Structures are given as structure tokens and as C-alpha cells.
């Protein structure tokens, strides 16, 4: 619990590293594959501007969006400005007719909306933003409720005049600060950079993903990196084919503002994997091929495609592997698991979890535990039928029963 | 005492939840928990929190009740507003409540309430209401356009014109829709065409916009203008709304000069298959004017109508169309965005060379589909051999396409097939369907395909709707099927040759296909052939 919390908070505080780490980071900076450039531009504040001259509104009627920073959204471009005004009018109309529209939009959200071409896609995106806004509001409310509850509990607790022991009270153990955990994790990562196993993340799929998928991808990359550093034997992760202007990298650098610091233990490069390693050593992990990965080979370098395909599934990684003439492999999911539902595509952070555990002892049964349980038949699924009647239920029947039930529940919901 | 009992119950429940699997046998716990819960539950029901969708539904309910109940036009709008806004976690807030109230008023078709509410808004804001409200007002006027007086029409007209003038530089489809709706209520409805042209967004105009103009044009008996607009709308959206047909039939009843056949002719020219609701409407209207319509079916093998024994027209793909389809298929489906997705350049070149040497064929067989689609329906795995034998006995030139691992499945039969036909195997990582289609297309218009696949994915990739319909026609005419009878008797089904579209035969009998209405989520038949036909005897 404590460790995972540290792991999450760590990302924002990595600017202040301990002395020992700075010494180590000399190595890490020499290992960085890409020279640091200026950090990505971020928007902190919006200066309000009077929009009355731009749209002929009457002053007294309330308007949905009254603080729009036209300059920073359009960047002074005339064509975008007229497009933006058109967009604002469209959103106003939707807002007035009681559609689900967020009450505030940030500058980058305006820019994203401007990029969408069709009306229906804009409406979908607005609804998505609306839901996010409501979620945030609810989170705040819930937090306040919980705080009130907690305070009440503390007040009602019996008091003694003696020293109190327990969590958040006195303890015989020394408190471990986040800084200390950080230095441990970073030490491990730096060690992996020097002596550890390499793994490549191919970030060249920006153009094939929608905006939502791209942000999801960036989040998965973050999770991947933070899981790897808490692992007992981490990989040396190298992000290759990185496009610094792409949405994925921008989202990633938004969550890790210090990504370009020379002391930060994250490697990324815009080079292709073919420039980094000899072709014979590379193995592309893709679910679309026929070859099965039998065991982890420490001489090979594995590549994972940083791609989220929620909308349409195309064999892009397969095409890439074929074109570059490198070996391809997929995980032996059918051999070790009884699949229940969902696609057999895994997220990027699940892939790294599996590969990291597999590297230790080549134990597939252990490594594949990281696949979400909802996708797999329960362990006792075969035995369940034995209690009442004598015949055994096959895996296929269980799967079909499950599907039928899920279809029914969907229909009932409608 | 009661309270203590409740406490005990909740404690026990917690205890059971955590420890039941370990302590008590499962069946017994079941009984205990049930008994306890049945006593406890009535007291524990918590009122649902007023938030999110639940709250906004409540808000809507308040407004609707208010609108339905009210009889006079002088109403206390302030009270309504405050009662709605007292629920503070719904989707309606101070900013959009005006629009929401107006929307619900117009849903209930209460023009008087709409007017009184607009008066109230004007009083509150001391001046003009904003654009969005005005548009909503115009829309609600359009909904009950027959009740408008001359004064109101004039007011709407000036409103629309000023709206158009002010917002011309940021015109969008929704705004234009509102303006056109407004202008169509007035005698100046012809201006809407000018507006549409001047807005410069002719590609984006919505269906509703065109429907407004068309309805008005038909009401004014401007038939040529109306039908050209219908054609334009159909080209853009591929849709025929019910209202248009209804208005057209109403017009036919009043005026003898206009014929019912115009709708059928339109369907014939565009080869559009309508839905069941529209078909019912047409049939009802035709029955009213004394024309006999019957639901019928068409025999697959010869294309005869069950009702009138007429033979339907043949589907024909012209040479130029076919050539266009060939080119389009190669560029859009075979190669697509990335040739490596389906195949590889090396393989494609090999295949092209192979076809050039060995074409033309009589039949192209999708080997993998044959091997897998009919699995389990026939005793042993000799289906491929049986089918190939049938073709070879007819002295047809056959090309078998599959992947390399097909050899393993075929086993001993492979030698026989190899001797008697052409074979092309793609790599295990390539897709084989595009190769089948390409081979059939390349070798000429007479070649047939044997597969159970309807190739809808490839049809989608073609893009343009006209080319898609050409592809559909070509596939329907050239796709052979299999029928397996008990006793392993295999019959090759001939393709459907008749045209699956609205058509008129020589003696004046119309045949119109339509699609059955289906509940969303239910199993639906693939769209290869229309479900039902209607026989219309003039």
C-alpha cells in the first residue's frame, strides 16, 4: 500500500533527487539516447477576455462559455478563429437544448474539438468531456463526505492521557519517506540500464489511433514505466520511434514534467529499433502472428507495440514485422488459459508485467496471472457441475452460457 | 428492543459475509442469511441520492407535469424555474433551463405556452433572447405550423432573415436547419433555397433541412422542384423519410394528374431497398386508391413471383462498371493503406504473374472457407474432393486458393486436386479472401466463385456507395453456394440471377423488395438479399 502510493506520487517529485542519486545519474545521463530539448509547452492559466465583440449576444442572457481565451486557442490564425466561432455557436445551440455539455472547457480541449471533423464525433467528444467533469465533481463531494465522517470518528474515539500507538500515531519503526523509496527504485532502474535486460517499446502508431486512444496509450505507457521500476528485477525500457510532437508523447510529458531532465531514468529515442540492435536479435510481440513464444530467451530483444486499438483492429504490428523482416511471436494464451470473454489483446502495461515475471523463472503459469481475471474462466469452472448431476460441463458450454447471459442482461438494460 | 435486534442482525450479516465459507457449510448459511435479511431489509432502504441522470429525469418530470396541467397562458414561470433549480445536482442549471423548458413545451405541441414563455424571457432579459433560444422558438413554431397567424408568420420571417444576415459568416448546419424551418412556415419559403446556396455549406446540410423544403414544395404542388430536391437528398444521405412519401400520396389523392408510380419509379431508378414501415405505408396508400398489393416471395432458382408467376428481370453488370470495380478493388481492398496488412508486395506480384499465365477460369474456389465453413456437416473430410470432382466432371477450369497450411488439412486428396486444377497458396500470415475475389474479377465477367462468405468487410472497404452496389450485384450473380443433404449428398447451388430491386415488368406489374423490421439487438439476416417482396398490380 505504502509502496504503491509512493510510486504514484513519485512522478511529480522527481525533480528533487537525493545526493546519492545525482551521482548515479551521471551514468544515466550518459545512457540517455536522446538529447534533452526544451520541455513541452503547458497551459497553466487562461486570461479571460470579453467576448461581446465577437458574438452578438445580449448582455443580460446567461451564456454557457464566457471566458474563452481566443488568442491561445487559435494562435492568431484567422481561419481557425472563424472555425472556432462556428464551433462555439454549435456548442451553444447544443447547450441550450439541454444536451450533456461540460460547463467549462480548457484551451487544449478546445483545440482537440477543433481537430474533429464531423458533428457527431464532436458531440461524442463533448459527452465524454461532460462525463469526466461530472466524475471530478462527484469525487470532490465524496471526499468531503468522507472527511467529515473521519473527523467525527476521531472525535468519538475514547481518549487516554498516555502515549498513543498505531497508524498515524507513535510507532517503534522509523518512518520511510517517499524520497528513500524513490532512490531505491531509481537505483534499481540505473542498475538495469547498465547490466539489465533491454526491452523496446515501439511508439510509431500515433497516426493509427484516435485522440482518446492516444491518451489511453500515454496512460498505459506511464503505468508500464512505474510498474517496471517497482519490480524486483526491472527491464531497461527504451521507447523508440518516438515522435516528440505527437499526442502520446505530449500526454506522457504532461504527467512526467521532468521527463527531459538528464537525471530522470527514462530512455526515449526517435531512432528505429533497427538502428539500435541487429535484426537477428529482435522479436516483435504481436497477437496476430502464428508463432508462439515458447520461453523467454535472454539473448533476444523483445519489442512491444505501443498501440491501443479499441475501435478497429488491424494487424498493424504484423505488417510492420513482415516489412522489417524480423521475427514475430505471440504469447501462448491458448495453451495455458481457458478464455472466457473479451479480445485476446492485452494492454501494454500488462505485457510488461508478464514479460518481467517471465524473465525471472520462465514460468508461464505464474507470469500470465497478470491477465485480468474477468477474461478467464474460473479455476473451479469444470468441477462446479459435479455437485448436483454427474456429467461434467465442458469449457465451451460454460463460455456459451456466460455469453448468453451477458446478452440477456444487455437487452434488459436497454 | 427492536433496535438491539437490528444491531444484532447487521452484526450477524457482517460476520457471515466474512466468515461463512470457513465456518458454516454453504447451504446452511444460505438459509440463515435469507431469513435474517427478509426481516431486516424493509427498514434499511435508503432514499436514492438526487444526482446525475436520476436528478435530471426528475427535473424533466417537473416541467412536463407543469406543462401538461396548465390550461391558461398566463403562468408563473418563475415558480417553475425555482422548483426545477432546487434540485441542484441535475443536468439543468441556470444557464440552460430556458432552452429545456422551451424544448419540453414544443414536445407537447403547446404553441400558446411557447409564446408565453418567450414573452417571459423577453421581459426578464429586457431585449432580445439569444440565438439559441430564438432557434428553439422557430423550431417549435414549425412543429405546429398550421396554427400560425399572419402576424406571427411575418415576425418569424423577419427574425429568420436577420438571423441569417447576422450569422452568415459562421453558419453551421444546425443554425441553417432552424432558419430554413422558420422560413418554410411563411409564404416566402422559396427563399430557403437561396439561403442554402448562400450559406456555402451545401455538403453538410442535414436531412431535416431538406425534408422541410421538400414538404413545403409538395404542399404547394411544385413537383419538379420537389423531386430534384429528393434526388439530391438521397444522393447525399441515402435515406427516404416517411413524411415525404406520405405527403406525395396525399397530393396524389387531391390531384389526378400526379401518379402514385412516381415513388416506385424513384425506387427503381436508385435501386434502393426500403424498410418495412415505409413499405406498409405505400401499401396502405395504394390500397386506398384501389390498387391491389400482396406480399409475396420469389423462387430462388428461377426468379418467379409466387403470386403472379412473372419472371423478374436479370441483374446485369455492364462492362464499364465491371472494369471500374476491378480497378477500385485492387487499389482499395487488395492494397489498401498498407500492402503488408493483407499480404506482401512479393506475394502480390507472384500472384499477378500466376494469374496472367493461367487465366481465365470457370470457377474460383475459396479452399479454406470450403474446408472450415461446412465442418461437421459432412461425415469425413472429403468435401473438397467431392466438390472438385463435380467441377472437373463438368470439364470446368478450376482455381483453388488457400493458405499453405491447407495442404495439411487436405492430406491425401491433395494429389488428386493438384493433378486436375490450378492451385495457389498464399502465406500463412496473409488473408486469402482478397486473392479469391481478385482472381475471379481478373479472369473475366463469366467466372464464378464458390464460397459461403458474403464478403461484407471487403464491400465496406470499396467506399463509394455506387461501387458497393455494383460489387453486391456482381457477387450475387457469381457466388455459388453448397447444400448438403443427409447421406453426404452435395449439391452446388446456382447463384441468384434476378435483380433485387424495385422493377416493373412488361405487363405493368410492379415488384418491390423491402427489409423486415427487426428489434435492435435481435439476430439479423445478412444483407445479401431482401427479406420480403411486394407484388403491386396496377
Image (cartoon, coloured by chain):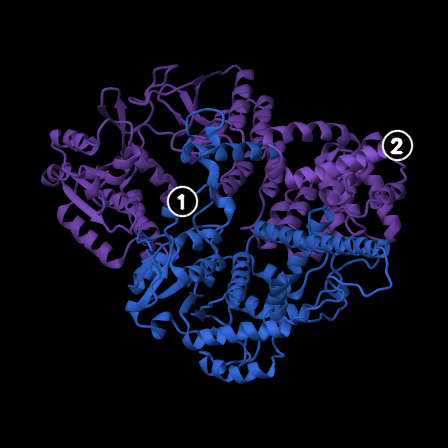
Chain colours: A blue, B purple
Q: In this view, does B28 lie above or below B462?
A: above
In the image: residue B157, left or right of residue A7: right
Q: Residue A129, position in %: x, y?
A: 65, 55
Tag on residue B460? 1
Q: In this view, does A14 lie above or below A64?
A: below
**Outermost residue, left side:** B419
> Is residue A27 at least partly visible in the picture?
yes
Instruction: Please tell me which residue is depicted at 46% across the width and 24% down the height of the picture.
Output: A389
The quarter of the picture where the N terminus of chain A appears is bottom right
Quadrant housing residue A22:
bottom right
In the image: residue B342, left or right of residue A28: left
Q: Nearer the viewer, residue A179 or B86?
A: A179
The answer to which of marks 2 and 1 sits earlier in the sequence is 2
Q: Is disc 1 placed on a helix, strand or loop?
A: helix
Provide the chain ID for the residue under circle 1. B
Mark 2, other Cα within 10 Å: few <14 / some 14–19 / many ≥20: few
Q: In this view, does B108 lie above or below A272?
A: above
Q: Name the residue that disc number 2 marks.
A: B72
Mark 1, other Cα within 10 Å: few <14 / some 14–19 / many ≥20: few
User: Marks 2 and 1: same chain?
Assistant: yes
Question: How far apart in space, not on screen, are marks 2 and 1 (Cα)?
Answer: 56 Å
Q: Residue B514, position in %: x, y?
A: 46, 27
Q: Which of B336 and B293 is in front in this view?
A: B336
Q: Residue B202, position in %: x, y?
A: 55, 51
Q: Residue B485, position in %: x, y?
A: 26, 21
Q: Is disc 2 placed on a helix, strand or loop?
A: loop
Q: Nearer the viewer, residue A72 or A377?
A: A377
Quadrant housing residue B406:
top left
The quarter of the picture where the C terminus of chain A appears is top right
In the image: residue A149, left or right of residue B186: right
Amino acid at each position: 500500500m505504502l509502496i504503491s502510493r509512493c510510486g504514484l506520487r513519485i512522478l511529480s517529485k522527481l525533480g528533487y533527487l537525493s545526493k546519492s542519486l545525482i551521482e548515479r545519474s551521471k551514468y544515466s545521463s550518459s545512457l540517455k539516447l536522446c538529447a534533452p530539448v526544451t520541455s513541452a509547452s503547458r497551459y497553466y492559466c487562461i486570461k479571460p477576455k470579453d467576448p461581446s465583440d465577437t458574438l452578438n449576444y445580449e448582455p443580460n442572457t446567461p451564456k454557457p462559455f464566457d471566458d474563452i481565451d481566443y488568442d491561445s486557442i487559435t494562435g492568431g490564425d484567422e481561419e481557425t478563429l472563424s472555425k472556432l466561432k462556428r464551433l462555439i455557436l454549435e456548442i451553444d445551440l447544443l447547450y441550450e437544448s439541454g444536451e450533456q455539455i461540460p460547463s467549462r472547457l480548457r484551451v487544449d480541449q478546445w483545440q482537440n474539438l477543433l481537430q474533429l471533423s464531423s458533428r457527431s464525433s464532436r458531440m461524442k467528444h463533448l459527452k465524454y468531456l461532460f462525463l469526466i467533469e461530472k466524475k471530478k465533481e462527484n469525487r470532490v463531494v465524496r471526499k468531503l463526505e468522507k472527511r467529515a465522517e473521519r473527523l467525527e470518528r476521531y472525535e468519538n474515539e475514547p481518549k487516554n492521557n498516555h502515549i498513543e500507538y498505531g497508524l498515524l500515531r507513535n510507532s517503534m519503526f522509523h518512518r520511510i519517506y517517499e524520497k528513500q523509496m524513490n532512490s531505491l527504485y531509481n537505483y534499481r532502474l540505473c542498475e538495469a540500464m547498465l547490466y539489465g535486460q533491454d526491452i523496446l517499446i515501439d511508439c510509431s502508431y500515433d497516426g493509427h489511433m484516435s485522440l482518446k486512444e492516444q491518451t489511453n496509450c500515454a496512460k498505459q505507457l506511464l503505468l508500464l514505466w512505474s510498474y517496471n521500476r517497482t519490480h524486483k528485477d526491472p527491464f531497461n525500457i527504451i521507447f523508440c520511434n518516438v515522435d516528440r510532437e505527437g499526442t502520446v508523447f505530449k500526454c506522457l510529458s504532461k504527467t512526467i514534467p521532468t521527463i527531459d531532465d538528464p537525471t530522470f531514468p527514462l530512455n526515449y529515442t526517435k531512432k528505429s529499433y533497427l538502428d539500435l540492435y541487429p535484426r537477428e536479435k529482435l522479436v516483435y510481440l504481436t497477437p496476430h502472428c502464428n508463432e508462439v513464444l515458447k520461453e523467454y530467451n535472454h539473448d533476444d530483444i523483445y519489442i512491444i507495440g505501443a498501440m491501443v486499438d479499441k475501435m478497429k483492429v488491424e494487424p498493424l504490428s504484423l505488417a510492420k514485422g513482415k516489412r522489417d523482416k524480423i521475427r514475430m511471436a505471440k504469447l501462448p494464451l491458448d495453451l495455458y488459459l481457458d478464455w472466457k470473454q473479451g479480445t485476446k489483446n492485452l494492454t501494454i502495461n500488462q505485457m510488461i508485467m508478464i514479460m518481467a515475471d517471465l524473465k525471472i523463472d520462465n514460468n508461464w503459469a505464474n507470469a500470465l496471472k497478470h491477465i485480468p481475471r474477468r477474461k478467464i474462466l474460473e479455476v473451479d469452472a469444470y468441477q462446479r457441475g459435479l455437485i448436483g448431476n454427474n456429467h461434467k460441463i465442458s469449457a465451451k458450454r460454460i463460455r456459451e452460457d456466460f455469453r448468453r447471459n451477458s446478452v440477456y442482461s444487455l437487452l434488459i438494460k436497454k | 428492543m427492536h433496535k438491539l435486534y437490528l444491531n444484532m442482525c447487521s452484526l450477524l450479516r457482517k460476520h457471515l459475509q466474512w466468515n461463512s465459507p470457513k465456518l458454516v457449510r454453504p447451504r446452511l448459511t444460505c438459509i440463515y442469511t435469507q431469513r435474517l435479511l427478509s426481516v431486516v431489509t424493509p427498514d434499511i432502504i435508503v432514499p436514492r441520492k438526487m444526482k446525475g441522470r436520476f436528478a435530471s429525469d426528475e427535473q424533466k418530470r417537473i416541467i412536463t407535469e407543469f406543462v401538461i396541467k396548465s390550461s391558461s397562458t398566463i403562468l408563473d414561470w418563475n415558480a417553475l424555474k425555482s422548483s426545477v433549480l432546487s434540485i441542484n445536482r441535475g443536468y439543468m442549471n441556470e444557464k440552460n433551463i430556458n432552452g429545456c423548458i422551451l424544448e419540453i413545451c414544443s414536445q407537447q405541441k403547446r404553441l400558446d405556452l411557447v409564446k408565453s414563455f418567450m414573452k417571459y424571457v423577453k421581459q426578464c432579459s429586457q431585449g432580445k433572447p439569444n440565438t439559441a433560444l430564438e432557434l428553439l422558438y422557430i423550431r417549435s413554431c414549425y412543429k405546429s405550423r398550421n396554427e400560425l397567424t399572419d402576424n406571427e408568420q411575418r415576425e418569424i420571417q423577419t427574425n429568420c432573415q436577420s438571423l441569417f444576415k447576422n450569422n452568415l459568416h459562421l453558419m453551421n448546419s444546425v443554425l441553417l436547419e432552424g432558419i430554413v424551418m422558420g422560413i418554410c412556415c411563411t409564404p416566402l419559403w422559396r427563399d430557403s433555397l437561396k439561403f442554402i446556396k448562400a450559406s456555402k455549406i451545401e455538403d453538410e446540410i442535414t436531412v431535416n433541412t431538406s425534408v422541410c423544403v421538400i414538404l413545403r414544395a409538395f404542399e404547394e404542388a411544385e413537383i419538379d422542384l420537389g423531386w430534384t430536391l429528393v434526388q439530391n437528398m438521397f444522393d447525399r444521405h441515402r435515406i427516404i423519410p416517411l413524411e415525404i412519401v406520405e405527403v406525395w400520396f396525399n397530393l396524389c389523392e387531391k390531384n389526378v394528374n400526379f401518379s402514385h408510380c412516381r415513388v416506385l419509379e424513384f425506387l427503381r431508378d436508385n435501386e434502393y431497398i426500403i424498410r418495412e414501415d415505409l413499405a406498409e405505408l405505400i401499401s396502405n396508400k395504394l390500397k386506398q386508391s384501389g390498387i391491389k398489393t400482396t406480399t409475396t416471395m420469389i423462387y430462388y432458382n428461377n426468379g418467379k413471383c409466387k403470386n403472379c408467376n412473372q419472371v423478374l428481370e436479370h441483374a446485369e453488370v455492364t462492362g464499364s462498371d465491371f472494369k471500374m470495380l476491378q480497378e477500385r478493388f485492387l487499389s482499395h481492398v487488395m492494397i489498401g493503406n498498407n500492402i503488408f496488412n493483407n499480404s506482401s508486395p512479393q506475394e502480390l506480384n507472384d500472384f499477378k504473374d500466376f494469374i496472367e499465365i493461367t487465366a481465365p477460369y470457370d470457377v474460383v474456389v475459396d479452399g479454406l472457407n470450403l474446408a472450415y465453413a461446412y465442418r461437421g456437416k459432412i461425415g469425413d473430410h472429403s468435401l473438397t474432393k467431392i466438390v472438385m470432382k463435380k467441377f472437373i466432371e463438368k470439364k470446368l477450369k478450376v482455381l483453388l486458393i488457400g493458405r499453405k497450411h491447407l495442404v495439411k488439412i487436405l492430406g491425401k486428396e491433395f494429389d488428386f486436386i493438384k493433378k486436375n486444377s490450378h492451385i495457389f497458396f498464399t502465406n500463412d500470415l496473409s488473408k486469402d479472401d482478397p486473392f479469391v475475389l481478385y482472381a475471379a474479377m481478373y479472369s473475366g465477367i463469366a467466372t464464378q466463385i464458390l464460397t459461403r462468405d458474403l464478403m461484407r468487410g471487403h464491400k465496406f472497404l470499396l467506399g463509394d456507395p455506387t461501387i458497393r452496389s455494383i460489387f453486391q450485384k456482381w457477387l450475387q450473380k457469381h457466388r455459388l453456394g453448397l447444400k448438403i443433404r443427409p447421406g453426404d449428398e452435395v449439391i452446388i447451388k446456382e447463384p441468384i440471377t434476378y435483380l433485387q430491386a424495385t422493377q416493373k415488368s412488361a405487363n405493368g406489374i410492379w415488384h418491390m423488395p423491402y427489409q423486415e423490421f427487426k428489434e435492435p439487438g435481435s439476430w439479423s439476416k445478412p444483407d445479401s438479399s431482401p427479406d420480403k417482396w411486394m407484388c403491386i398490380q396496377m
